[in-house]
């Protein structure tokens, strides 16, 4: 259905969903404790690196909370917030202080007693910048009247901040704290582990598929996984400014792998763009590094404003390509990807504004919230493609197997054909050899002998000459039967007539040749052809010798049932006295014909012709 | 062929009794005269070399000193209007077709009775061309084969010629073919002659093509 929607509406829908996602992410950070909770929204700031709270009356500047050090004129790394809490009565149960956001390392005192954090932190500083803080206030510490709250904050590069403070019985604060903790820490933990697993899985797929789209996605997912670690790590292994440098380098890696993957995903080749993006990702951090020699403030300003801004701009081009493709192609995959990218883009812009000091810092960084939907959607899309490819491979394999099987059958049948052809060739060669022998030997001898006998006046020689002639005719039939008749009875009939016509001419008999095409007869080999010709020869000899006929009709009768078999039929009829009237009723000749028919698997019928005479019918079974 | 004398016949047959029978039969026919006879290829060649001529030559192929086809070629080269009939015991296509390719007009079946010999010779002299079903079948197959040479492309059978051959394969006589295809016997006969000529031309074309392929003939 999506395909039928107006393409701009389609895109607008994706944009709206991304906006709603952004709004929802922001809303998550607005959750505050319930009514009845004390919310402190102002404090005095004392710029001091002491490890003990300064006297409450120390000079300082008035600061509304939340407070951002980047607005301070002092450019200090350490300072104290002093706030006053007035209570009418002393609490009779456990109270806590809830700080939704701060940066970087706190030490919290109530009425001069340390209740949490570290007021004398060592470098590298622990990073509490991405998690809420909830510390319990020991019973008896809070008293009726004025209570002094002192919070020491230390942050490298004058980068500190403190949100508003909430004080209340612990159970009144736990809900808001846990919710914020879930989204800032637990959810991010899950996303981080998930992205690592997805990266590994895609790495395996890229190895299996040998397709760079999977490798780039694995790299993108893994760089996002690393990026998340910067939000989660509290105790860093090396100096904070180098840690920040690592984070900037990894964001560069993320932007590059994202661009590379998108180009591959859309099947677009932009070699110059790709080279440029890769160069920026490599060179950018190297340019940032010397700035540390100037100051961490400069380093962080350039890193967060210019570097992140540049990467955001670079990432806009692939995002634009996806949206453009969505507008032209309107496919469901692209629809969801557009939502995710737009959401990532909006949250990325938010983070850039925050790190550049142009936005409200106390919600923290938000782009990591786009990781879960984006990676999930991309993962699903790639997995789907992979499954499709697998299925396609399976189908292709099946087709291939089918083709191989077909080919094997073809080869097998070709082999059988070749074998048959070989046999035919063998037969032909054998026939040629016999023919040669006949010409040079028997045939020549027979003809020569006939020549001698014909010139003799002896009656016995005349008989001998007739026998010789019959032998020669039979020999010719044998030779003809060796011819390959291509399973065509009519061809055999043609050969037969050529041999029998002189005999009929000599006997003064008329031959009517009523021949039409017959269906092909299976397995019509030389032996069957010879039996068939000899049956016809026998029938004709019987007619010539005994039937007192004047005419013989040879005809093809098409398909007919003889003795229950469907046969291609040929008949020989005469107009003589009929078989019953001949002196032995057909006798030996008939038996010969029956014997030959049985030998050659032919059907045979001998019956009186209509209007007198005899009909001999030979049938070739057509059904094997 | 001269009109004021009987057509002369030369007989090349190695079997003495058969040769004698043939010569006797021809001699006994007043329309024909014997030009000569030979029992071997050498004798026949010598006869030819002496400058002798014949209107018809009866040639046996299996000779003690060679193949009669050589003589057919020689006499065709010398005297292309001599009608050559191959003497064969079986009328099988192998020998006959080879002879026709070499220029023979037809074949003569060896029979007990030699009466038909003169009749067959006179038929040939009158433009007839004997053909058997097995030869017809061979010719049909031969002309269906793809031709190797472009030069022989034009040497194909016409539809009518194919029809005539198919009828012969089925055993029909010239007269019956004439009735079946609504043609005169004479037309059927001349179709057969054309077919024989085409076979001869085609064979020569193929021989030339083969020679070119083998580099025996330079066509530049």
Image: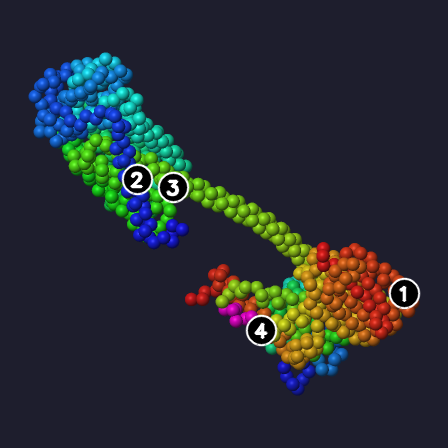
Any part of residue A60 in sight: yes
Picture quadrant of residue A182: top left
Of the image marks 3 and 1, the number of the one nearer the N terminus: 3
Pointer 1 chain: A
Pointer 4 chain: B
Considering only vertical position in the picture, is A32 above or below B150?
above
Q: Which of the pair B34/A181 is nearer the observer?
A: A181
Of the image marks 3 and 2, the number of the one nearer the N terminus: 2
Left or right, residue A280 beside residue A524? left
Residue picked out by circle 1: A585
Q: Which residues are magenta?
A: B151-156
Left or right, residue A227 beside residue A307? right
Considering only vertical position in the picture, is A278 above or below A164?
below
Measured Cα–Cα span from mark 4 to mark 3:
68 Å
Q: Which of the pair B150/A589 is nearer the observer?
A: A589
Of the image marks 2 and 1, the number of the one nearer the N terminus: 2
Left or right, residue A280 beside residue A393? left
- Where in the figure is residue A127, as x and y percent of width and height? 23, 24
Residue picked out by circle 2: A21
- Category of crowding for the residue at label 4, using alpha-carbon neighbours closer than 10 angstroms: few (below 14), some (14–19), many (at least 20): few
- Category of crowding for the residue at label 1, using alpha-carbon neighbours closer than 10 angstroms: few (below 14), some (14–19), many (at least 20): few
Image quadrant occupied by the C terminus of chain A: bottom right
Picture quadrant of residue A342: top left
Measured Cα–Cα span from mark 2 to mark 1:
110 Å
Residue picked out by circle 3: A381
Camera-nearest label, 4 or 3:
3
- Category of crowding for the residue at label 2, using alpha-carbon neighbours closer than 10 angstroms: few (below 14), some (14–19), many (at least 20): many
- Magenta region, mostly helix, strand or loop? loop
Pointer 2 chain: A
Residue picked out by circle 4: B158
Measured Cα–Cα span from mark 3 to mark 2:
20 Å
């Amino acid at each position: 259905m999506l395909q039928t929607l107006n393409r701009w509406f389609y895109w607008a829908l994706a944009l709206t969903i991304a906006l709603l996602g952004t709004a929802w992410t922001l809303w998550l950070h607005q959750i505050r404790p319930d009514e009845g909770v004390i919310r402190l929204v102002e404090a005095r700031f004392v710029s001091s690196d002491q490890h003990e709270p300064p006297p409450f009356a120390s000079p300082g500047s008035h600061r509304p909370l939340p407070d951002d050090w980047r607005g301070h004129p002092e450019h200090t790394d350490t300072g104290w917030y002093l706030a006053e809490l007035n209570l009418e009565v002393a609490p009779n149960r456990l109270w806590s202080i809830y700080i939704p956001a701060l940066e970087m390392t706190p030490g919290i005192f109530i009425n001069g007693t340390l209740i949490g954090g570290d007021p004398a932190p060592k470098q590298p500083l622990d990073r509490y910048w991405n998690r809420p803080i909830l510390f319990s206030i020991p019973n008896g510490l809070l008293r009726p009247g004025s209570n002094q709250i002192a919070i020491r904050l230390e942050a490298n590069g004058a980068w500190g901040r403190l949100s508003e403070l909430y004080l209340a019985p612990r159970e009144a604060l736990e809900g808001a704290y846990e919710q914020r903790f879930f989204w800032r820490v637990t959810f991010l933990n899950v996303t981080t582990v998930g992205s690592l697993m997805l990266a590994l899985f895609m790495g395996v797929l890229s190895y299996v598929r040998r397709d760079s789209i999977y490798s780039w996605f694995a790299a993108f997912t893994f760089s996002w996984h690393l990026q998340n670690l910067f939000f989660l790590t509290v105790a860093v292994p090396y100096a904070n400014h180098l840690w920040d440098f690592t984070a900037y380098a990894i964001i560069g890696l993320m932007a590059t792998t994202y661009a590379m993957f998108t180009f591959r995903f859309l099947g677009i080749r932009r070699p110059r763009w790709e080279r440029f993006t890769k160069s920026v990702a490599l060179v950018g951090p190297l340019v940032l590094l010397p700035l540390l020699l100037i100051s961490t403030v400069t380093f962080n300003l350039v890193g967060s404003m210019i570097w992140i801004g540049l990467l955001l701009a670079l990432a806009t081009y692939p995002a634009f390509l996806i949206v453009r493709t969505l507008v032209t192609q309107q496919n469901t995959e692209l629809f969801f990807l557009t939502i995710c990218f737009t959401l990532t883009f909006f949250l990325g812009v938010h983070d850039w504004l925050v790190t550049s000091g142009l936005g409200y810092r106390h919600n923290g960084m938000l782009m990591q919230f786009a990781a879960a939907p984006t990676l999930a959607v991309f993962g699903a899309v790639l997995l789907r493609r992979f499954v499709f490819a697998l299925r396609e491979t399976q189908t292709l394999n099946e087709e291939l197997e089918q083709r191989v099987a077909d080919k094997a059958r073809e080869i097998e049948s070709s082999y059988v054909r070749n074998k048959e052809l070989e046999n035919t060739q063998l037969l032909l060669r054998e026939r040629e050899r016999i023919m040669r022998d006949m010409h040079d030997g028997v045939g020549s001898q027979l003809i020569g002998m006939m020549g001698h006998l014909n010139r003799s006046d002896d009656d016995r020689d005349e008989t001998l000459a007739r026998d010789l002639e019959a032998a020669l005719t039979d020999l010719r039939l044998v030779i003809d039967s060796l011819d390959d008749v291509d399973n065509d009875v009519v061809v055999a009939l043609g050969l037969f007539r050529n041999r029998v016509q002189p005999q009929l001419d000599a006997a003064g008999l008329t031959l009517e040749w009523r021949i039409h095409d017959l269906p092909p007869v299976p397995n019509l080999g030389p032996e069957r052809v010879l039996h068939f010709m000899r049956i016809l020869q026998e029938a004709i000899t019987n007619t010539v010798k005994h039937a007192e006929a004047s005419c013989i009709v040879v005809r093809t009768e098409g398909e007919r049932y003889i003795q229950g078999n469907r046969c291609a039929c040929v008949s020989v009829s005469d107009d003589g006295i009929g078989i019953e009237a001949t002196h032995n009723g057909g006798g030996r000749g008939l038996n010969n014909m029956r014997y030959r028919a049985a030998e050659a698997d032919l059907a045979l019928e001998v019956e009186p012709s209509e209007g007198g005479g005899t009909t001999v019918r030979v049938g070739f079974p057509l059904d094997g | 062929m001269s009109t004021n004398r009987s057509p002369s016949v030369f007989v090349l047959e190695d079997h003495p009794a058969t040769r004698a029978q043939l010569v006797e039969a021809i001699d006994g026919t007043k329309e024909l005269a014997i030009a000569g006879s030979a029992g071997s290829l050498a004798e026949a060649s010598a006869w030819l070399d002496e400058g002798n001529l014949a209107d018809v030559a009866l040639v046996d192929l299996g000779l003690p000193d060679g193949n009669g086809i050589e003589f057919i070629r020689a006499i065709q080269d010398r005297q292309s209007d001599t009608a050559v009939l191959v003497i064969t015991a079986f009328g099988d296509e192998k020998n006959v077709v080879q002879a026709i390719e070499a220029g023979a007009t037809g074949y003569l079946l060896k029979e007990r009775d030699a009466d038909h010999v003169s009749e067959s010779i006179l038929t040939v002299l009158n433009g007839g061309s004997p053909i058997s079903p097995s030869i017809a079948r061979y010719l049909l197959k031969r002309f269906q084969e793809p031709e190797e040479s472009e030069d022989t492309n034009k040497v194909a059978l016409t539809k009518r010629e194919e029809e005539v051959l198919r009828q012969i394969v089925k055993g029909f006589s010239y007269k019956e073919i004439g009735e079946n295809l609504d043609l005169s016997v004479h037309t059927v006969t001349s179709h057969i002659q054309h077919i024989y000529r085409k076979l001869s031309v085609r064979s020569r074309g193929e021989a030339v093509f083969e020679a070119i392929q083998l580099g025996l003939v330079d066509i530049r």
